[in-house]
């Protein structure tokens, strides 16, 4: 079975604008490799991948120009999950 490929691009040219939206689109209990191709840019957001979302690969289209970041530190953790 071929991998499912999802594209993220902040400018709207991909299927999703944020990496989290793409992750959320992967079904729980996923059994198919899903490649999330991330267009160049800085994506400043926390990312949460449920432990039942298997076979996810994140790939920067131009890794040197693709940054996934958030402002967490060891003493200050902020996320959107409750």
Image (tube, rainbow, N blue to C red):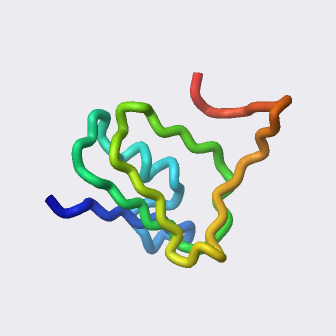
Who's the residue at 36% across and 47% down the image?
25
Q: Residue furthest top?
A: 82
Q: Taking 63 as reference, is 53 above or below it?
A: above
Quadrant position of residue 37: bottom left
Q: Residue furthest left?
A: 1
Q: Whole-percent x and y of residue 61?
A: 50, 75
From the viewer's perspective, is 72 left or right of 21? right
From the viewer's perspective, is 79 left or right of 12? right
Q: Taking 46 as reference, is 77 above or below it?
A: above
Closest to the observer, 12 or 47: 47
From the viewer's perspective, is 14 left or right of 72? left
Q: Whole-percent x and y of residue 16?
A: 44, 60
How many numbered tags mark residues here?
Answer: 0
From the viewer's perspective, is 63 left or right of 27? right
Q: Taking 65 as reference, is 22 above or below it?
A: above
Closest to the observer, 15 or 40: 40
Who's the residue at 51% across and 54% down the image?
19
Q: Whole-percent x and y of residue 82?
A: 58, 21
Who's the residue at 62% across and 69% down the image?
66
Q: Quadrant of the N terminus?
A: bottom left
Q: Whole-percent x and y of residue 73?
A: 81, 38
Who's the residue at 27% across and 41% down the image?
30
Q: Taking 21 as reference, is 66 above or below it?
A: below
Closest to the observer, 33 or 6: 33
């Amino acid at each position: 079975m071929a991998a499912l490929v999802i594209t993220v691009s902040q400018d709207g040219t991909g299927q999703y604008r944020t990496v989290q939206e793409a992750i959320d689109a992967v079904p729980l209990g996923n059994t198919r490799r899903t490649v999330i191709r991330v267009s160049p840019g800085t994506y400043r957001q926390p990312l949460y991948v449920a432990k039942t979302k298997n076979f996810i690969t994140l790939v920067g289209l131009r890794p040197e120009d693709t940054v996934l970041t958030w402002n967490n530190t060891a003493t200050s953790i902020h996320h959107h999950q409750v």
